[in-house]
Amino acid sequence: MLQRLPNPAPAAPWVRACLIIGISIVLSVLTAQHPALRFVDFVRFSERARQLWLGAHLSDPLYPIGYPAVLALLAPVCGSALVAGKAISVLSGVVLVAAVASRLGGGAALWVLSGHAMLLAGTSEGTDLPALSLALAAVLWVERPILSAALLSGALLMRYTAVAAVPVVLLLSKQRLRTLLTLTVLTAPHWAVALYTGASMLPDQSQNMAIAAGAPVPLLSLDTLRRWPGGCGRALLDGAGQPVVMLSALGFVPALLRRDRRAWALIGFALLHAAALGLGFSNARLALPITACVALGAAWLVPPRLLWVAAIVVGALSSRVPGDNDLEAEKAGGVANLLAAHPELSGPLVCTSPWCYRFDGVWIEGGIQLSGLGGGPRMDPNVLAAKMRTAGATVVALETGRTRRQAPGLAPLLSNRVPDGWESVGAPRGWHVWILSRP
């Protein structure tokens, strides 16, 4: 039986070259269909990248310095931080495909990127796919210590969660000391900056743990220990719960029986990542490394030619499925475009949604959340005007649904009637944008 099942082999150089060109074109086309912000956390990345040019915000408890540093370098070149972020994700998808093709074949490379979660990550700005691509490449290329350590260092500088790949690489490396030394040197942008600024070299996961537990809890506690197994199970379901991914996992049975080091490495990476997520909370985006690793089990289960066909069919279907937040992102993009058409409307922006942003040169920046101003549901246009002047803001963007739920007293600003002291800037889809008149 094992003799009949495929044993994945590297794709020929010309196949890899065609894959790289093809995937670059496909991801670029799909990305161009969603020019607005698609990942809300990117606003924070853009703001930090901008601060890096000023020598500020060198360390952060949630994200290492790698991604904002790359963004800071590319944004001026691309003319927009948002465009640069999308370009990084497209390039990361290409790196992932190239790495998998060089070890498991072209069919497996297409298959790992064909799922909806993977395609969404490859066409959206964010740290998830860059970290995954580099970490997975490091795991697959573990037999080349320097290259593997360099790739893993890049992954660690993108996301702290890439640490799940470190034990796998060190355990399977034939030159552990050289691998460890390379890792230490190349991750210096993180630990050296932390030592210089006095910041912790370890990430702060207290917020994620509090979300999972429903209240602040210490890492070393019985509560965390009790929640851990269930958290690991949820992470595995988030990452491998889709039917096609579950079926792909069957391929690891013959692979492990053959003692294939590639399969052991992938399984180890997936399980360690699930163990890390189990301490906090998980979702499909955070569990992306699990999805990728488990999906690659298909390389030992499905004949290469059939895997090519399956990848193309699944990829075509997945590309037609919108992201969960695409509609909200598209609406917020309308506000950003409206404000960009009125450069005279400078200064802080008050808004009702974290998705709301504005362009400021090559950067994008978020607004002051209405809830942060205080006032509650009884806030009316006059109270809002007073609070905005105190905050130094003159422009407010109100998303219709959120405003009616959170601040029904602002209903006059959701109509075409102009309240005293306000001037309408415009009403892009689902939003109303106003500017304060001079008192």
Image (cartoon, grey):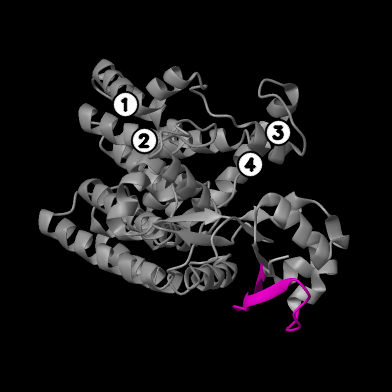
Looking at the image, residue 76 lies above or below residue 149 = below
Q: What element does badge 2 sit on?
A: helix
First reached walking from the N terminus: tag 4 or tag 1:
1
Looking at the image, residue 125 lies above or below residue 262 = below
Tell me if 68 is positioned left or right of 332 in this view.
Answer: left
Looking at the image, residue 5 lies above or below residue 38 = above
Say whether marks 4 and 1 touch (CB < 8 Å): no
Q: What element does badge 3 sit on?
A: helix
C-alpha gap between disc 1 and disc 3: 30 Å
First reached walking from the N terminus: tag 2 or tag 4:
2
Query: What residue is rendered at 65% in x and 61% in y?
Result: 394
Q: Which residue is mark 4?
A: 281
Amino acid type at circle 1 is: Leu
Camera-side mark, 4 or 1: 4
Q: Which residue is mark 3?
A: 227
First reached walking from the N terminus: tag 1 or tag 2:
1
Q: Which residues are magenta?
A: 415-435
Q: What element does badge 4 sit on?
A: loop
